[in-house]
Image (cartoon, rainbow, N blue to C red):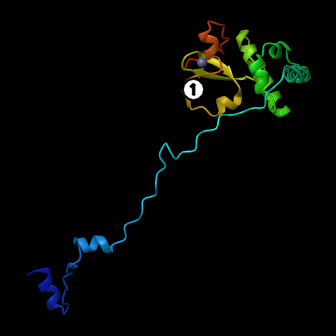
């Protein structure tokens, strides 16, 4: 006994769906809505990228920028040498940047110079394990976002990697037994 027979015995007459005569015919394709494909712009239609044009910076402007950076460095108690080492291009790039951002830039330059001298920046109080350098000190904010394995925040690279590559000295935190 088929399912249809059982249904009929229960007073239910199954209806077999019939295929629309239009299915699969050319007429169906014509009648159905074919969404229009948005036109993807080709190279020709793309607007050309405009090169960044900065206003020309005169020698006097660069001098004023250096003076401003020196004043900021002095205000932060930083070694003024980090400003004197800046190139003309660096000074031009600083044009128009807010003072707060310039202070952060100078602090970063000071940290770099400190590491190059083989010393730990005062803000770098957290120990991590760099895959290349081994145990190093970094800022706690960096350590806080690293995955911790066997008690060590681990990184694939660190702020000391450039010192290592240059053959410089890296002061290491005491090694732990779990390394
Ligand atoms: Zn490293």
Please identify the quadrant where the C terminus is shown: top right
Q: In the image shown, does 83 or 136 lie closer to the viewer?
A: 83
Q: At 27% from the left edge and 73% from the top edge, which residue is drawn?
A: 28
Q: At 62% across and 6% down in the image, what residue appears?
A: 167
Give the number of callouts.
1
Which quarter of the picture shows residue 70? Answer: top right
- Circle 1 residue: 154
Residue 119 appears at what percent x and percent y? Answer: 74, 12
Q: Is residue 85 left or right of residue 24?
A: right
Query: Is 19 or 173 nearer to us in this picture?
Result: 19
x, y percentage for residue 56? Answer: 79, 28
Q: Quadrant of residue 110?
A: top right
Task: Work out which quarter of the rendered image holds the N terminus and state it.
Answer: bottom left
* Mark 1 crowd level (few <14, some 14–19, many ≥20, 10 Å Cα): many
Establish if 114 lies above or below 157: above
Residue extending farthest to the front is 44
Q: Find numbered disc 1 in the image and state the secondary structure of the residue it sits on.
A: strand
Q: Quadrant of residue 160?
A: top right
169 horizontally vs 96: left or right: left
Q: Residue at x 82, y 13 (%)?
A: 84
Question: Relative to the observer, which residue lies in front, 87 or 75?
Answer: 87
**Residue 156 in picture, x, y percent from top left:** 55, 24
Q: Is residue 84 left or right of residue 125?
A: right
Query: What residue is drawn where x is 57% and y is 32%?
Result: 147
């Amino acid at each position: 006994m088929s399912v249809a027979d059982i249904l009929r015995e229960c007073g239910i007459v199954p209806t077999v769906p019939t295929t629309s005569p239009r299915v699969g015919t050319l007429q169906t394709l014509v009648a159905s809505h074919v969404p229009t494909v948005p036109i993807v712009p080709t190279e020709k239609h793309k607007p050309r990228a405009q090169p960044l044009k900065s206003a020309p910076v005169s020698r006097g402007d660069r001098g004023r920028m250096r003076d401003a950076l020196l004043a900021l460095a002095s205000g932060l108690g930083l070694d003024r040498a980090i400003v004197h080492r800046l190139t003309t291009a660096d000074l031009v790039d600083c044009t128009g940047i807010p003072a707060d951002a310039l202070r952060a830039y100078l602090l970063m330059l000071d940290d770099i110079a400190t590491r190059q001298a083989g010393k730990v920046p005062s803000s770098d109080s957290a120990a991590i394990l760099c895959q290349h350098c081994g145990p190093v000190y970094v800022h706690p904010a960096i350590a806080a976002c690293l995955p911790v394995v066997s008690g060590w925040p681990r990184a694939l690279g660190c702020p000391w990697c450039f010192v290592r590559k240059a053959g410089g000295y890296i002061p290491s935190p005491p090694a732990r037994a779990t390394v």
